[in-house]
Amino acid sequence: MTDGFTPQPLDREATTYIAGHRGMVGSAIWRAMEGRGHRSLVGAASSDLDLTDRGAVFDFMAQHKPRYVVLAAAKVGGILANNTYPHDFLSKNLQIQVNVMDAALEQGVERLLFLGSSCIYPKLAEQPIHEDSLLTGHLEPTNDAYAIAKIAGILQVQATRRQHGLPWISAMPTNLYGPGDNFSPTGSHVLPALIRRYDEAQRDELDSVTNWGSGTPRREFLHVDDMADACLHLLEHYDGPQQVNVGTGKDATIAEIAGLVAEATGFQGETHWDTSKPDGTPQKLLDVSKLAEAGWTSRIGLREGLAATVEWYREHGDSLREVG
Ligand code: NDP
């Protein structure tokens, strides 16, 4: 149904609504678009526009009539939060997505990018994880509610394409890091937690740091500015119903990553591993060949990206979000 649409450079004058523009990903996309001369960016904080309020979302969309929409608003959290509040992760994310996409459909939004997450793939998916493994097995139970909401989002994009012919697309990022991350001790993901721990250890001149697990699981991390660049690339160069994985295509052990964080913070002490604590899945790496076919590969290496993130963390230490 999207026959005849050819991806093309985004119109710098067109109104673009970035839902979630104060979040880590949304703010990076905002910075990237602003840097490329987009003059008509629109966003609203959740305190001004609660995206679970369907009437308010329709009014907002009718008022601004965006030509492009990036859907980077979501209720996001670490394993603990996902496992403790599965109802909220399912219900709020479904509401946000359905409201934004239904309102965008009403306005005939030309290009919409929906952001999901690599947790949509089965727990035991073959590595590296290809887009085709979606819906081929059981999900990781600790974040299945969040994953099902994101899978529903991909399906809504596909259904809108099929039924209404709008060339909307979905992107599934790997683990992200960078400015604007959540550094809270209870709610943060692996990388911000490591940065916080090593930074404190360096400041307090500790002899050693102890991390959970064995350090052997392999993980992939993409800098959020690379992520923003990939999103804009996809909007300008990709059209298709299938979600596109966004990552670096390279992973590293947690021990290697911890070593780079120690280096970036200047921590000189030893690192110990508490092997009585769980390791999680042995490897999580996305197959990024589809993204490469679309003409994009990541540019920011982990060492360089971590050094910049530690610098950002130290500059913004007092004003960091403490989201649980
Ligand atoms: P953040 O938590 O940093 O930002 C989420 C944004 O969503 C916030 O700006 C928040 O607005 C907004 N939001 C949440 N609920 C509502 C609501 N009810 N009404 C209006 N706005 C709301 O998340 P990220 O930027 O990290 O994530 C963005 C997307 O990227 C998500 O879809 C996530 O799944 C995906 N992603 C992120 C990864 C990561 O490692 N961070 C990895 C893979 C995918 P406000 O600030 O105004 O409250």
Image: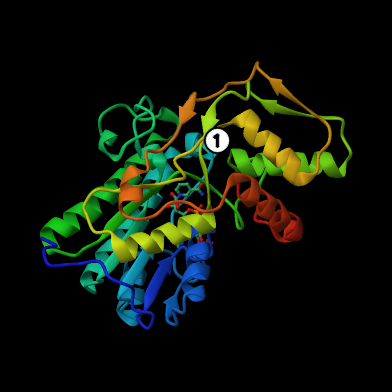
| Image height of 123 relative to 49, above or below | above
Q: How many marks?
A: 1
Please state if 164 lies on the left or on the right of 249 as rendered.
Answer: left
Residue at the limit of the structure toward the right, as seen here: 205
Q: Is residue 52 visible?
A: no
Q: Nearer the viewer, residue 273 or 79?
A: 273
| Image height of 195 relative to 213, above or below | below
Secondary structure found at label 1: helix
Q: Position of residue 140 (x, y in %)?
A: 40, 29
The amino acid at mark 1 is Leu
Please state if 227 lies on the left or on the right of 304 as rendered.
Answer: left
Q: Nearer the viewer, residue 137 or 175?
A: 175
What residue appears at the point 51 percent right and 38 percent down from the top-left corner? Answer: 220
Q: Nearer the viewer, residue 263 or 100?
A: 263
Q: Position of residue 45 (x, y in %)?
A: 51, 68
- Give the quadrant of residue 229: bottom left
Q: Which residue is mark 1?
A: 80
Q: Position of residue 39 (x, y in %)?
A: 45, 82
Please state if 274 lies on the left or on the right of 169 as rendered.
Answer: right
The quadrant of the picture occupied by the N terminus is: bottom left
| Image height of 161 relative to 154, above or below | below
What residue appears at the point 28 percent right and 67 percent down from the top-left corner? Answer: 111
Please state if 300 lies on the left or on the right of 203 as rendered.
Answer: left
Q: Position of residue 288 (x, y in %)?
A: 37, 43
Q: Nearer the viewer, residue 249 or 310?
A: 249
Disc 1 crowd, CA 10 A, few/some/many (<14, 14-19, 20+): some
